[in-house]
Image (cartoon, helix red, strand yellow):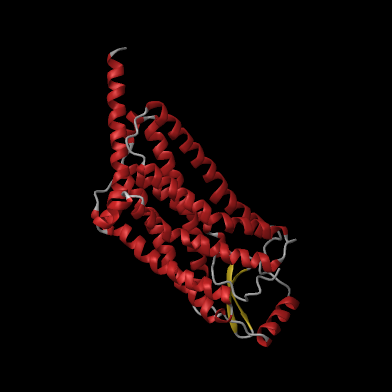
Amino acid sequence: MESTDFNFDYNSYIDYDNSTSSDNLTHEEVSFHVHPITCFTQVLCLLLLVINVIICLLGLGGNGVVIWIAGFGMKKSVNTSWYLSLAVSDFIFCACLPFNIAYSVTSEWIFGLFMCKFTSFIMFLNMFSSIFLLVIISVDRCVAVMFPVWAQNQRTTGKASVLIVLAWIFSTALSIPSIMYRDVQNHLGTNRCINIYTSSQYTHEIIAMSRFVFGFVIPFILIIVCYTVIILRLRATQMAKSNKPFKIMTALILTFFLCWLPYHTFVLIEQKKTFNTEVIALGLKIGTTVAAANSVLNPVLYVFMGNDFRKKFRSSILSKIENAIGEEGRTISRYLSRSSSVDARASTHI
C-alpha cells in the first residue's frame, strides 16, 4: 500500500507498509516529477512543521532544565531518579526531531541509512521508555502505600536504578523492529527514509499490534489498577496530607495516553485496509505530532503543578521544578514515617 499523498513521511513514528510493486513505484515516481509537492506548498504540512519546531525547542529547553535540577541540583532519591530518566528519554527524542524536520523541509532524506534507522528507533524507544517508567512509578507508589514499613526499608536508589535499566532494556528490545524495517530507497534520484515490510505479509500487523498491546493497553491496565488501590487505601487510612504528587502523576499519565491515543487509533485503523488512505495519512500525521508533544508537556507539568498558581510568579522556574519533584518525595516520606509509627503502636498492643 502506498504511504501517503504527502509524498514524504517526515516523522519516524509513521508506520506505513511501503512494500509496493514496481508498477506502483513507477506510477508514484512519474506523479512526483509531474506534480512536485513540498511541505511549504501545503498548509497542513507547514502547520505541523511549525508545531514540531516548537516542540523541539521547548522540549530541549524544558527537559534540559529538569535534567539539570534532578541530576545535579537535588539530592539523589528514588523520586528524582524516576523523573530524571523520564526527562532524559524526552530530551533524546527532541534532539532527534531536527532530522525529521529537515526531512519535511527538503522532501529528501540526506542523512544516510544509519540515521534513518536510528531516528526511527529513538522515536519508539521514547514511547516505550516513557510508559514503562510511568508504570514503574505507579507500582512504586502503590507498594509504598500498601506496605509502608517494607517500602521504607527496601525502597532505595540502587534498586530504583536497576528498575530503570530494565525498563530501558525492554524498551530497546521492543524498538528493534524500527531498525530492521526502516530503509533508505532512491526513487529517480530522491532518497526516502521509509518502512519496508517484506519478510511476511503479517509483519506490519504484528508489529503494530505489539506496540499497541505493550506500549498502551497493558500499561494502561496496570496504572489504573495501581491508582485505584492507592486511592482506596488513602481514603481508608486518611493519611494523605497533600495530593500534589498524585495530581502530578495523574496529569503525566493522562497526558501520555491522550497524546498517544490518536496515533495508536489510526495505526490500527490502517491495518483494516478498507478506509480512505488519505484520511489515514492525515490522521497519522496529526497523531504523530500530538504524540511528539508529550515530550514537551512533561516539564511543563513539573512547573505548573508544583506550586499554587499565585506563587508561580514569586519564584524562579528552577525552584518550581525542584519543589514539584521534591514535594512528592516529602509526601511519600511523611506517609511512610506515619505508617511506621502506627504499625509500631499497634504492635505494642498485641
Q: Position of residue 191 (x, y in %)?
A: 58, 80
Name the spot of residue 335 as percent of width and height, x first: 31, 33
Q: Compared to 287, does 302 lie above or below?
A: above
As drawn, the residue found furthest toward the bottom would be 34
293 relative to 35, above or below: above
Q: Is residue 308 left or right of residue 13?
A: left
Q: Residue at x 69, y 58 (%)?
A: 271
Quadrant location, the C terminus: top left
The part of the image, by quadrant, that contains residue 298 is bottom left
- Residue 153 visible? The answer is no
Give the residue furthest to the top. Answer: 350
| Residue that appears at 44% across and 53% down | 168
| Residue 292 visible in image | yes
Residue 14 percent coordinates (x, y)? 58, 65
Of residues 37 and 167, the one nearer the viewer is 37
Q: Quadrant of the N terminus?
A: bottom right
- The residue nearer to you, when weighing 190 against 304, is 304
Residue located 55% across and 81% down the image: 40
Pick the residue in front: 179 or 7: 7
Q: How many numbered circles does the render carry? A: 0
